Image (cartoon, rainbow, N blue to C red):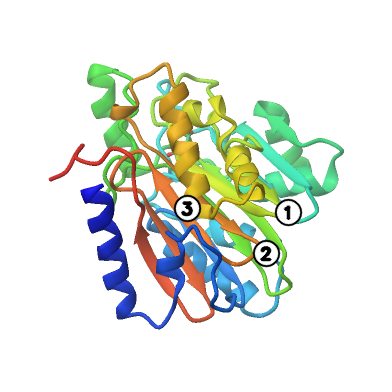
Amino acid sequence: MQHRRSFLKKSIALTTALPIFNVLKSFASSPIKASKPNGLIVSTWDAGIRANAAAWKIIGNNGTALDAVEAGVKITELENNCCVGLNGRPDRDGFVTLDACIMDDKNRCGSVAMLQKIKHPISVARAVMEKTPHVMLVGDGAFQFAIKNGFKNEWKGLSKDSKIEYKKWLKESKYKPIINIESGKRNHDTIGMIALDKDNNMSGSCTTSGMAYKLHGRVGDSPIIGAGLFVDNEVGAATSSGVGEEVIRIAGTHLVVELMRNGDSPYAACKKAVERVVEKSPNNTKEMQVGFIAINKKGQFGAYALQKGFQYAVKTDTYEKLMDSDYYYKNQREE
Ligand code: ASP
C-alpha cells in the first residue's frame, strides 16, 4: 500500500509539470472529465518513442490508425538496438524467426509466425489480412506468400551485436527468459502499438523476433490475436510484451479488452490481467516479466507489469512521454 501510494504520488508530481491529464488518467479508475485527446498512440518500451513519432505523422495528418500502427512499428523493425526484426536475437539454433500481427477497427486481423529473412513482418501480416481469406500464415508458407507479394529476401546474417551475444550464450546454452526485467538495455524483443485516430477508430500492431534462444519453431504471444494483441473498436485495444507463454495461457489482451468492456479503466484491466498471470501460472512469475498496455474508446490509456522496468511511450497531439509502468512485485528487484 505504501509503495502504491508513493508511486501515485510520483506520478501526480510528474503531471504538475505537464500541461495534460493523461499521466493521472492512466491510473484512474473513475470516468475522466477532461476532454479526449485528438488522436492517441501508445507503444511498449522506449523504442515506442521513435515508433510513435512515425505513427503520429499519419494520425496527425488525419490518417487511419491502421496505417499508423503499421508505419510506426516498421521503424522498430529496422532498428539495430531493439531486437525486433532481422537484427533481433536468434533461436538456439542460430535462426532469427519473426512473429507479427495487426488488427483493425473492423475486426480484420492478419498474422505471421516463424517468418524468416523478411525485413517487415508487420507488412506481411497486413498483406495476410488484406489479401487472403486467412488470419495466420507460418514458416515457409508465410515466406513464400511474402515473396509472391513483392517482399524481398533481405537476410544478411546475424547482426554484429546478435552474433556476439549468441556466441556468448552458446558457451552455456541455458534457456532462461530474463527479458524485460530492466529497461534501457538491449533486453526486450517486441514492440506492440495501439492507436486511436481522429475518426475515433482503433487499430493495433505487434512485432518481435521472440524470446532469445527459444527452441527452433517456438512461437510466442506476439502474433496471436487475443494474446499479444487485441482490438475491439467499440471498447478498446491492448498489447503485451514479456514471456509470451504466460500471456497465451490467459488470452491476455483479449482479457484486458473484455475487462474494459465490463467497465474497467485501461489501468485496472491491465492490472487484473497481470494478477491473472500470477494466479494461473504454473511457473515462478517472480523471475519473469509480463507487461500489458491498453487504450479505450474514451482516449484513456494505462499499463501494468509483473516487474519494475516495463516502460511504454505515449503520444497525443499535445503530449509525448516515456512512462514507467506500475507493477505487481513491489519490493522485488528494487535497487
Ligand atoms: N512476447 C515476446 C515473446 O514471447 C517477447 C518479448 O516481449 O520480448 O516472444
- Mark 1 lies within 8 Å of ligand 1 (Cβ measured): no
User: Circle 2: is it few (<14), some (14-19), or many (20+) Cα within 10 Å?
Assistant: many
Circle 2 residue: 65
Residue 95 seen: yes
**Residue shown at 66% from the left, 38% from the top:** 225
Q: Is residue 283 above or below residue 324?
A: above
Q: Which residue is mark 1?
A: 104
The CA span between labels 1 and 3 is: 22 Å
Query: What amino acid is labelled 2 in the image?
Result: Ala
Q: Position of residue 228 (x, y in %)?
A: 57, 39
Estimate the spatial distance between the alpha carbons at disc 2 and disc 1, rounded to whole Å: 8 Å
Q: Position of residue 87 (x, y in %)?
A: 43, 44
Of pointers 2 and 3, the one earlier in the residue sequence: 2
Q: Does 179 sit above or below residue 185? A: above
Is the Cβ of the residue at disc 2 closer than 8 Å to that at disc 1? yes
Which residue is at a point 63% across and 66% down the rendered structure image? 298
Amino acid type assigned to the residue bearing label 3 in the image: Tyr
CB atoms at circles 2 and 3 under 8 Å apart? Answer: no
Residue indicated by mark 3: 267
Considering only order in the chain, which callout, 1 or 2, is on the residue closer to the N terminus? 2
